[in-house]
Image (cartoon, helix red, strand yellow):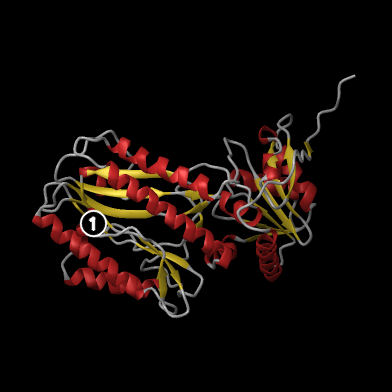
Amino acid sequence: MTTPRPDMYRFHNGEKSPLPFDAAEYEDRLDELRERMDNVGATAAVFTSMHNIAYYSGFLYCAFGRPYGLVVTATECVTISAGIDAGQPWRRSFADNITYTDWQRDNFWRAVASVTGTGGVIGYESDHLTLMQRDKLEDFLQPLTMVDLFETTMRQRMHKSEAEIALIRQCAAIADVGGYAIRDAVRIGTREIDVAMAGRDAMELEIAKRFPDAEYRDTWVWFQSGINTDGAHNPVTARQIERGDILSLNTFPMVSAYYTALERTMFAGEVDPASLKIWEANVAAHEFGMSLLKPGASCSEVTRQINDFLQERDLLQYRTFGYGHSFGVLSHYYGREAGLELREDIDTVLEPGMVISMEPMLTLGEGQPGAGGYREHDILVITDEGNENITGYPYGPEFNVVG
């Protein structure tokens, strides 16, 4: 007789692993989430994004083409994971866990429905749920109605707890470790990839030292030289560093889904007068911008003032993007607290407990005097009186003409 194949099961294998935060932190997050759900009438929240699942449960999934979820009701918090991950999603989360099988299509949604029931008011994330998966949600959960939780959960994540700030502070120090390793690795003739690996390796070793119980993944470096510095997110290449090159140092340690960054303009061996002028102007904009980050200032007003600062120096036309963004559970391929970015169209007012970068960037095209991309990046915690800069690696020409 053939043994029936289940649609889902609980595989609580081993013991719960240490998480980046204690139980009280996750309980506080869920308490606030449930208040926000009550405010919009949601009987259940079905999260599908990496950032919200990690924020509320501690579990960071690896999709590989499979759906993952977190279901929160008034009494339950359950991650929904694929059988390929076995017991790891349960061990690495604060939540309960249901494993769905792939022996029948859409067992993921059957597992979700086993927690939510049918006919409820379902909260979802409009910035993440695909049209195909939304259709399946409606088919399997048969909601009375659906409410969007994207905005309210983002607002919650924008305000950091003391525990989050303590973690971010450690991560900023790890980014500095990577920066110093990169500085030591820069030599004329060295490839970008070799410099990047030196910074990444130093950070991963530091993460393992500071967080011996963590999972290790996703830490990376973008180290760019010459024309490759023109974009902030340009990938690493095998280009060899030449004397007089503009360089861009970018370290990104990742600890338990929490992102930090260090970004610095550098020059290889020497800096020409035209480049030095642009570099010093960008440093001045950076310092001016940091002085503006204080409670009560709006993102749009900070942006306007930095725009005026650059316009007075006839440099505003070289600005390429906004001047800063929030930190927390985010990465270059998941998450974003778009309501806390220093741009003209964001009117969010800064409050104590927010964490934000200041990172002006000027890009001059090839063939112009001072060609290249100039960027400085510090992480600042908004305090009652102003801000605290938690980035330690120095910026500017005095320290960053290297090799």
**What amino acid type is highlighted by mark number 1?**
Phe
Q: Nearer the viewer, residue 198 or 222?
A: 198
Q: Reply above or below: 356 against 351.
A: above
Left or right placement of residue 298 versus residue 120 in this view: left
Quarter occupied by residue 20: bottom right
Relative image position of residue 54 (x, y in whole percent): 60, 52
Q: Residue at x 10, y 53 (%)?
A: 272
Does any portion of residue 146 appear in the rendered image? yes
Q: Reply above or below: 108 against 355.
A: above
Relative image position of residue 197 (x, y in whole percent): 37, 38
Relative image position of residue 72 (x, y in whole percent): 72, 56
Q: Nearer the viewer, residue 190 or 260?
A: 190
Q: Residue at x 58, y 46 (%)?
A: 131
The quadrant of the picture occupied by the C terminus is top left
The residue positioned farthest toward the right in the image shown: 1
Q: Reply above or below: 76 against 193.
A: below
